[in-house]
Amino acid sequence: MRSNLRPARSTFIGRAADLEAVETAFAAGDRLVTLTGPGGMGKTRLSMECALRRLADATLQAEEGDAIFFCDLSEATDLASIAAAVARAMDIPLTSGTDPAAQIGRALAASGPSLLVLDNFEQIVAHAAATVGTWMAAAPAALFLATSRERLHLTGERAIELGPLPVPDESALARPSDAVALLVERMARLRRAYVASDDDRAVLGKIARQLDGIPLALELAAGRLSVLSPDALHERLQARPALLGRGSTDAAARQRTMEDAIDWSWNLLDPPERTALAECAVFRGGFSMDAAEAILERPDRAAIDVVQALRDKSLLRSWEPAERPGEVRLGLYRVVHDFAAARLRETGDAAARARHAGFYADLGERLAAGVDGKEGPDCLARLSLERENLEAAFDTALRGSPTVALRALLALDRLLWIRGPLGAHIGRLDAAVDCGGSAPPALSAKVHRARGNTRRRLGPAEKGASDLEAALALARQAGDASLEGDVQTDLAALGVQRGDWAMARAHVDDALDVLRRVADRRGLALALGVQGAVHHQSGRPDEARAAYDEAIALHREAGNVRGEGMCWTALAAVHVDRGELEDARACQEKGFAIQKEIGDRFQGYSLYTLGVLQHDAGDLDAAERAYEEARGVARAVGDRRLDALCQGYVALSLCERGRFADALALLDRATAILAEGWDRRYGALLRALHGGAMAAVGRVDSAKSAFEEAEKALAGPGDALLLESVGVLRGLLDLAQAARTADAERAFALRQAARSRRAAALAPGPDGGRSLASRSAEARILLRVLGRALEEKETPAEHAVATLDPSIRPLLVHPDGRWFQAPGGERVECHRRPSIRRMVVALARKRLESPGDGITADGLLAIGWPGERILPDAAKNRLHVTLTRMRQLGLQEVLRTSSGGYLLDPAVPVRFVE
């Protein structure tokens, strides 16, 4: 076989799909394949690898008569120089006075089946028809593989665009990827016996991401690793691209640095294209054609034509964003962006940046206004796409057009409040407040409101309060009643967070009055949602449900799916506290589905609610998974309150398992965070749990202090429910003190006090009201924690006494189900209720044999109606009706659901009685 190929000087890494695409194209009958892409993307190396593999295959098969030629056209500028370069590669003489292209065509035809690789065709694309087109016609058995920064525009051409090498995901930087593999392989050539550690791979993953996975940039970076550690190179790459330096001295001049590679393409552009490419540096994170037309438009040439030309020359890349399938997004690779930004600075960039800031402030304002309407998910997705452009618009306009900057920032705030993260946002909000003194009162009010709410979430809460008070005064000064109502709603939410019920009720009542007066149904729905939280957290679940129901109706009317999702999640929490776990699960699933679809950070609270639901039902494994998933959302968006709550509830689950020492480490962190003022009430509850865990491991004095602090924090009105729950936890301190004393009589009295706390929580409230256990999921879980501890500590004699103690109030069941008696209730005869009779006995036996395990719906159907064949929908309805009736007959506080089915609450004793 005739060939001028030389062995490759470096290991070929990755590009398996691209190699296959070339071979597939040739196998399908395509004769001209063009590899396109920007400079440094590895087109030359891939074309060489394709040729070398063909040569190896032909050699193995001992094929004769084929030919493979590789021709570098980087120095060619016209027809004569193209022909001369190809003739040298094929080792054929050119006869003067004869058309050189025709001579090459005849030589190719005589070579039979052959492959001609034409490398670096971009500067001579105008001559493609007179050369490649002629040769394809003259030599029908020949194949052509070209590399070019733009396609050759010939009939029958198959263009394959090369993208970067895959880089690792930001969340898994040490995972294998082609880009990191290239860095490691090249680094091993420079350092003998080098083996990359996982830490090295993680840093190399960061470097690969910084360089967009562009092979030439990676090769140049690898060269620096001979004198720099990966960490040092990563830090210094902030000075891209100069730090990458020069590559191999035998490389083509245009590929010795990334700047050389890009400069080669720059010199091939006409003046309008150069201007447009430089101005593209004002964009961040990509842009749409609408943005390009607004910012790059010039009288001498339409923006769409210039953008198309830059895209054809591989200086712009395009992709379909996941947030908006079907839409085309345009952008620059980072190294190209740095080059373009340098050119823009040389010519002056103020006008382009001002156009950019104005365009995105207008766009962001429109999209933010639509988030709470029928187009909300689409507006949110578009805002998410433009996040980096909105940040750039704010940073640019802050110096010269503060009003434009504030408008851009408020649009950004709408996005980050919903999706996060909020941590880095606070710096821009501080800068906005500092420069917002000259802004109109309404605009200044919105900025103060944004910072107040962010501080309410991130802390410190008191600074958040001062911002919201300032926003309220400015809204009133502006005469904007809707804005005033919104700020009143925010202040009410802050009151809920503080556990200041007087503040919360006063502000939510004012918000509702103002918003009803101006018929602002959007704001009214949000205020009703906060009113629901006020009612729920202060122990009025029926009023909470009514407020949430009204809010959901208004959100649906407005098409505000996000608001509806938040209310469903909040309503789920109300049902959980009441022990209505089926209804709670249905509401939670509705809320979570909405939040997941639109990427709302509130899905963290939905997952937390799911965790409490599963925890209440006794499914500790599922609950811990939900809490940890909620923690992941909280950390991603910067919500430290939610993170602390989830840590606390994982610790609660560990306490229920008897792993108090493990729980303490989590509680140390969680209580420290909530002590900063994030949530007074739940901070106090977790402080009490901290005390209970310390008591369980023998740290009695520290436990006493923790309980005193918790009870002091919950001394105000509206905290009675949590204070009663803390009383249950004090039973762990009673048991710890009993273990410490040598006085047997005192020890017995202390253990009896713990049992009395448990009995009191299960007993009906004053005037026959609902028990603590029926009103609070936390109380039911804490009762199980205390119950386990009691079982482990009590003596056989005390167990006998406890069994006879009527204050324990067990569920009594006749052995064959003739009757049952719920704790504190009347005896219910079941002679004429055979299905209920069988199901109650089965559930009671399951409770005694395997506390916390449930019976599936199918299992209960088989028990209640043995041998009957029932259609699925009818069976589901029959079971639902029967379970509802069982609750009505007195099992409301006892019958629970879990992922494993239906069960009797493990916290409630069960006894079979003749």
Image: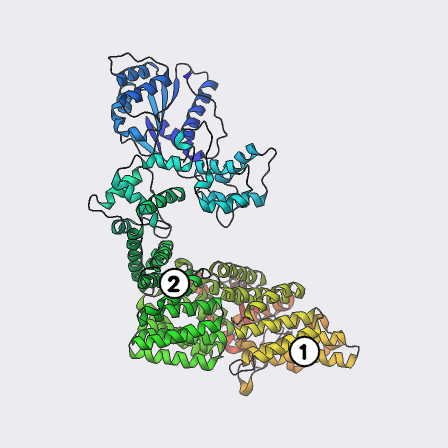
- Going by the image, does 462 lie left or right of 551? right
Residue at the disc numbered 1:
754
Q: Residue at x 60, y 67 (%)?
A: 652
Q: Is residue 494 above or below residue 278?
A: below
Query: Depth check: 673 or 807 in front?
Result: 673
Q: Is residue 331 above or below residue 484?
A: above
The residue under label 2 is which amino acid type?
Asp
Mark nearer the N terminus (2 vs 1): 2
Query: Depth check: 526 or 454 in front?
Result: 454
Q: Residue at x 42, y 65 (%)?
A: 430
Measured Cα–Cα span from mark 2 to mark 1: 50 Å
SS at mark 2 in the image: helix
What is the quadrant of residue 312 in the picture? top left
Specify the label residue 413 is tagged with. 2
Q: Is residue 91 above or below residue 551?
A: above
Q: Residues within 10 Å of mark 1 (few under 14, many from 20)?
A: many
- Going by the image, does 279 lie left or right of 895? left
- Residue 822 can be seen, yes or no: no
Specify the label residue 131 is tagged with. none
Query: Depth check: 131 or 734 in front?
Result: 131
